[in-house]
Image: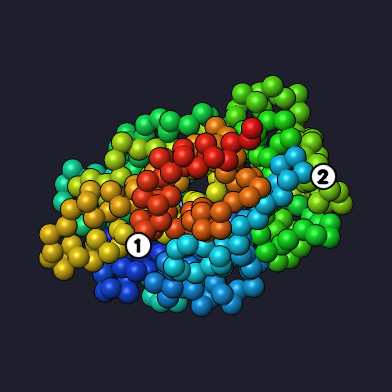
């Protein structure tokens, strides 16, 4: 049997937000790009509450107009609840320049919308494609794939961008995965018809903390159709202590242990399957190498608590596209300095505040009853995704600033 051989300048693995954004930017720059996606769209995914920083990247790729017109749930901030306390952050009142509003989206619809818009721009996206082997030791790289019809074929590409998300194609094939540094955690989640009580602000994501266990938290992400994404996150050890309950019983029981959520969701209808994701945090030994770069969750995934996943995915795609455009113009580029280091700088800022959330110091800051207005604006910028704004002291010196602020805000 003859194996079909084809040639592209850039191969993108995965048609999620990172892959589509990168491919669209490259296509608009006149670079030949092909996207191979294993699934057929629409398909379910978590990561449903976007951050305002993401809007700038959508605009960069000419995708923002379609998103604005799609009827997604408007989002202007984040609210936090714990033991009767309620604090909100309005993303329009932030320190960093840039968009202050965004959307809460069902990812099946959002990801398909982005892919459809990219296709309209002329981007070559092919669904139902499986990557079986990648050889990056040669130039151009060789990729062995199988189409939706089951027939194998071979591609040659000058560069490969892995945007395969939790599939993590290149990290697995190239043995790049390393421990994330986070305690293994688990999420249990579903979509509910929320029938939410009056007073629930649908323009914000609601993050609630368990009344007794500060490292157990919930998300409630309202959508424009009257449903919401509901999930609870805790250590895997915590869930193992309640192993007698199936996922649905577990989610319901934990939800109604939090009085604020119990009130909001008193009339909620659980009509969808309850899913579980274990050990989701991921890290790699390097984000790029000869002929390849890792985008979004294929590189590093921290935690869902601040909805950072899509923003990091878009930032990685934007940086990679900028670097590739320069490279194909014949300029000398340094992938570590031009892509990996600036991307990692923002990821590390998010990491600081995720770690602070679980150890409790950042929760003390969030729930502090008398915040200084400018400090709250700086913290709000981080929650809005502006972790690459080094003009913000809580970005430029994230660990030191959080440590000092937490000392002031710590109860007692």
Q: Which of 225 and 258 is in front in this view?
A: 258
Mark 1 is surrounded, within 10 Å at the Cα level, by few (under 14), some (14 to 19) or many (20 or more) other residues, namely: many
* Above or below 208: residue 239: above
Quadrant containing the C terminus in the rendered view = top right
Q: Nearer the viewer, residue 286 or 205?
A: 205
* Above or below 20: residue 45: above
Residue drawn at the location 53% of the way across and 76% of the way down = 66
Residue 355 vs residue 209: left or right? left
Give yes or no for contact between labels 2 and 1 (Cβ–Cβ under 8 Å).
Answer: no
Instruction: Confirm whether residue 14 shows in the render.
Output: no
Quick one: SS at disc 1?
helix
Q: Which residue lies furthest to the top in this view?
A: 241
Please state the horizontal and vertical placement of residue 334, each as a whole percent of the image. 18, 53
Q: Nearer the viewer, residue 8 or 294?
A: 294
- Cα separation, mark 2 vs mark 1, equals 41 Å
Residue 340 vs residue 37: left or right? left
Please state the horizontal and vertical placement of residue 42, each as a whole percent of the image. 58, 60
* Above or below 133: residue 245: above
Q: Check disc 2 and report the residue beneath it.
A: 262
Mark 2 is surrounded, within 10 Å at the Cα level, by few (under 14), some (14 to 19) or many (20 or more) other residues, namely: some
Residue drawn at the location 28% of the way across and 48% of the way down = 341
Number of numbered discs visible in the structure rendering: 2
Give the numbered dot on residue 221.
Answer: none
Quick one: SS at disc 2?
helix
- Eye-nearest disc, 2 or 1: 2
* Above or below 390: residue 261: above
Q: Check disc 1 and report the residue beneath it.
A: 318
Mark 2 or 1 closer to N-term? 2
Residue drawn at the location 55% of the way across and 32% of the way down = 359
């Amino acid at each position: 049997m003859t194996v079909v051989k084809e040639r592209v300048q850039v191969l993108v693995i995965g048609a999620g937000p990172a892959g589509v954004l990168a491919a669209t930017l490259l296509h608009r720059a006149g670079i030949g790009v092909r996207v191979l996606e294993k699934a057929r769209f629409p398909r379910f995914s978590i990561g449903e509450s976007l951050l305002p920083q993401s809007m700038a990247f959508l605009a960069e790729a000419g995708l923002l107009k379609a998103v604005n017109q799609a009827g997604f749930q408007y989002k202007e901030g984040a609210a936090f609840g714990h033991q009767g306390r309620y604090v909100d952050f309005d993303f329009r009142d932030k320190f960093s320049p840039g968009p202050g509003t965004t959307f809460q989206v069902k990812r099946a619809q959002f990801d398909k919308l982005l892919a459809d818009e990219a296709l309209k721009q002329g981007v070559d996206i092919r669904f139902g494609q499986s990557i079986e082997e990648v050889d990056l030791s040669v130039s151009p790289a060789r990729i062995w794939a199988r189409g939706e019809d089951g027939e194998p074929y071979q591609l040659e590409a000058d560069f490969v961008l892995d945007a395969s998300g939790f599939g993590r194609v290149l990290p697995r094939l190239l043995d790049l995965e390393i421990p994330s540094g986070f305690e293994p955690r688990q999420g249990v989640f579903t979509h509910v018809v929320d029938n939410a009580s009056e007073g629930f602000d649908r323009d914000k994501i609601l993050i609630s903390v368990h009344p007794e266990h500060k490292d157990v938290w919930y998300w409630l992400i309202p959508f424009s159709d009257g449903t919401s994404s509901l999930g609870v996150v805790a250590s895997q050890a915590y869930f193992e202590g309640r192993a007698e309950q199936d996922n649905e019983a577990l989610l319901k029981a934990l939800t109604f242990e939090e009085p604020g959520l119990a009130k909001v969701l008193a009339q909620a209808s659980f009509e969808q399957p309850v899913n579980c994701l274990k050990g989701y945090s991921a890290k790699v030994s390097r984000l790029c190498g000869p002929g390849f770069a890792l985008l979004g969750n294929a590189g590093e995934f921290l935690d869902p608590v601040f909805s950072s996943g899509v923003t990091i995915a878009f930032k990685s795609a934007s940086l990679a596209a900028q670097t590739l455009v320069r490279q194909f113009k014949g300029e000398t580029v340094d992938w570590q300095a031009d892509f990996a280091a600036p991307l990692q700088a923002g990821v590390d800022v998010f990491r600081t505040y995720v770690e602070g959330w679980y150890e409790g110091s950042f929760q003390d800051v969030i729930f502090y009853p008398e915040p200084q207005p400018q400090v709250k604006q700086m913290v709000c910028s981080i929650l809005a995704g502006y972790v690459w704004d080094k003009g913000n002291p809580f970005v430029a010196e994230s660990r030191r600033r959080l440590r000092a602020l937490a000392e002031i805000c710590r109860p007692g």
